[in-house]
Image (cartoon, helix red, strand yellow):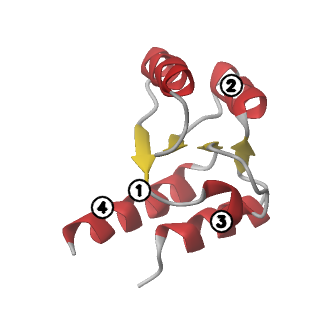
């Protein structure tokens, strides 16, 4: 079983992740977002902004306890938008399985 970090890394290497506040917001506004991931340590304002954006565009949001930046090879990033539906499903499924354990 792969961990969420593994699937997120695969998505990033495939060019299917918009990381960072600006890129993530652009992906959502252009209708490309399929899943919004927010690191647990992200600021209150960032969480509120992306939760509202995701709701507007009908994209699920998950607050995760993982180092998003490390998983995608871009340290310091706390926001990521997965832009591929299949990969978003795999990331979400692996998060759900990890929570069940």
Q: Which residue is drawn at 73% across and 42% down?
A: 18
Mark nearer the N terminus (4 vs 2):
2
For label 3, the residue is 71
For label 4, the residue is 96
The secondary structure type at the circle numbered 1 is: helix
The secondary structure type at the circle numbered 4 is: helix
Quadrant location of the C terminus in the rendered image: bottom left
| Viewer-closest of 87 and 40 | 40
The secondary structure type at the circle numbered 3 is: helix
| Viewer-closest of 33 and 67 | 67
Quadrant location of the N terminus in the rendered image: bottom left
Where is residue 58? Give x, y as percent. 43, 24
Which corner quadrant of the image does residue 96 belong to? bottom left
Which residue is outermost to the bottom? 1
Where is residue 47? Give x, y as percent. 49, 28
Camera-near label (3 vs 2) is 3
Mark 1–mark 2 contact, CB under 8 Å? no
Mark nearer the N terminus (1 vs 2):
2
Distance from Cα at disc 4 to Cα at disc 2: 25 Å
Marker disc for residue 25: 2
Camera-near label (3 vs 1) is 3
């Amino acid at each position: 079983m792969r961990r969420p970090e593994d699937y997120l890394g695969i998505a990033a290497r495939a060019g299917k992740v918009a990381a960072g506040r600006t890129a993530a917001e652009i992906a959502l506004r252009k209708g490309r977002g399929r899943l919004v991931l927010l690191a647990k340590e992200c600021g209150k304002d960032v969480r509120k902004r992306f939760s509202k954006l995701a709701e507007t565009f009908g994209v699920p949001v998950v607050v995760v306890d993982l180092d998003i930046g490390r998983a995608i090879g871009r340290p310091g990033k706390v926001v990521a938008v997965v832009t591929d539906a299949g990969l978003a499903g795999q990331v979400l499924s692996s998060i759900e399985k990890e929570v069940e354990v």
